[in-house]
Amino acid sequence: MKENQTNNNFCIIMAGGIGSRFWPLSRIAKPKQFLDILGLGRTLIQQAYDRFSKIIPKENFIVVTSVNYKHLVLEQLPELNEKQVLCEPLRRNTAPCVAYAAYKIKTKNPDANLVVAPSDHVILKEEEFIAQIKNGLAFARENNALLTLGIKPCRAETGYGYIQVKKQIEFKNLKNLYKVKTFTEKPNAEMAQIFVDTGEFFWNSGIFIWSLQSIIDAFDEHLQNVSSLFKKGLKLYYTRDEKHFIKKTYSECQGISIDYGILEKAKNVYVLTADFGWSDLGTWSSLYESKEKDMEGNVISGDNILIYDSKNCIMDISDEKVAIVHGLDGYIIAESNDTLMICKKEDEDQIKKFVTDVRINKGDSLV
């Protein structure tokens, strides 16, 4: 890739989530993107940076996070400076997050091409992943297109967006580029099963590639109320007035996802289908699926866990605690900061309720 083209490539890492579905390991004070959940010696956000730094100059990284996590980002990514960390004063979902980063980058490089990625994904086949990102950047640079990376589904997952492909697109030597027919965010279980059975649908990985101009045009067409707010800051970004402007803007901005607000409506959405060992670490079950299991199908994290007649469980217990687990099948057993949770894997959608109840009955310090 030519140097001037590389200098036009930016990476936006979205790192503002509170990770409540990973409680009690993930806490509001330090959510999962700042934890070494996989036990690899690097946190999830550090792994995301490591991955993209192979093709993106370090000065072209932008991390969008909560104002409460600015110190964690700078602590874990010392390669970045404060101007590269965009602090959201309120949670407003992914569309305002992308708009803020896009308009700020516009003041620096209007010719930019953007990779937008969450901070908490697992990529097992990094060489293949980087190859597909390069293919996507080449396509986005030459086309008015909104591109996402699609993963062939292996189950009827209700927590992901789904992409139905329309026709294959010819671009250079790519055999995995398709025009998108429909884009659906998080269907119910029955609809998700139909999607998987047809063979026409792919999971939306939540990793997007587009030129700066393409996404700004899309905001102007489909989310004008969002774009008009952030456009007002073009002369304020990178100045002392930016913080006050963003605080006011977020107080006025609707909360909406980029998927629902733009991708489900736009006509120029494309997908690169690929297999690069992707997993969205959004839940305990997704962590269970991504990790190695013992002979009984258990995923174990902790040096002092004794297991008897138990299978298909995920256990995460601190090394300082001794745990005896007997007679369980398909459970989450997780302990952190003096909090223990035992929950059926199939009922993990109740965890958000657990967090709410703990906050009400035991105080914020435990969540």
Image (cartoon, helix red, strand yellow):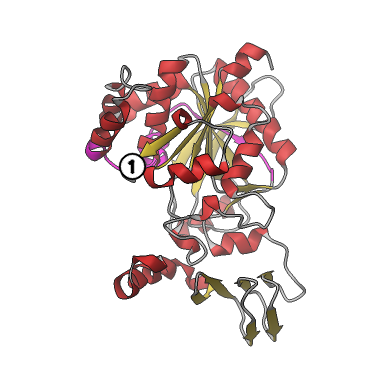
**363 versus 81 height, above or below:** below
Q: Position of residue 140 (x, y in %)?
A: 55, 22
Q: Position of residue 323 (x, y in %)?
A: 63, 81
Left or right? Give the position of 137 relative to 357: right
Can residue 273 be seen by looking at this rendering?
no
Is 198 inside the magenta-drawn segment? no
Residue drawn where x is 70% and y is 73% of the image: 303
Q: Nearer the viewer, residue 42 or 312?
A: 42
Name the element at disc 1.
loop
| Quarter occupied by the C terminus | bottom left
Which residue in the protein does label 1 denote?
Answer: 256
Left or right? Give the position of 152 relative to 338: right
The residue segment tinted magenta is 251-276
| Quarter occupied by the N terminus | top right
Q: Position of residue 118 (x, y in %)?
A: 52, 42
Q: Image quarter for residue 245? A: top left
10 Å crowding of disc 1: few (<14), some (14-19), many (20+): some
**137 versus 292 height, above or below:** above
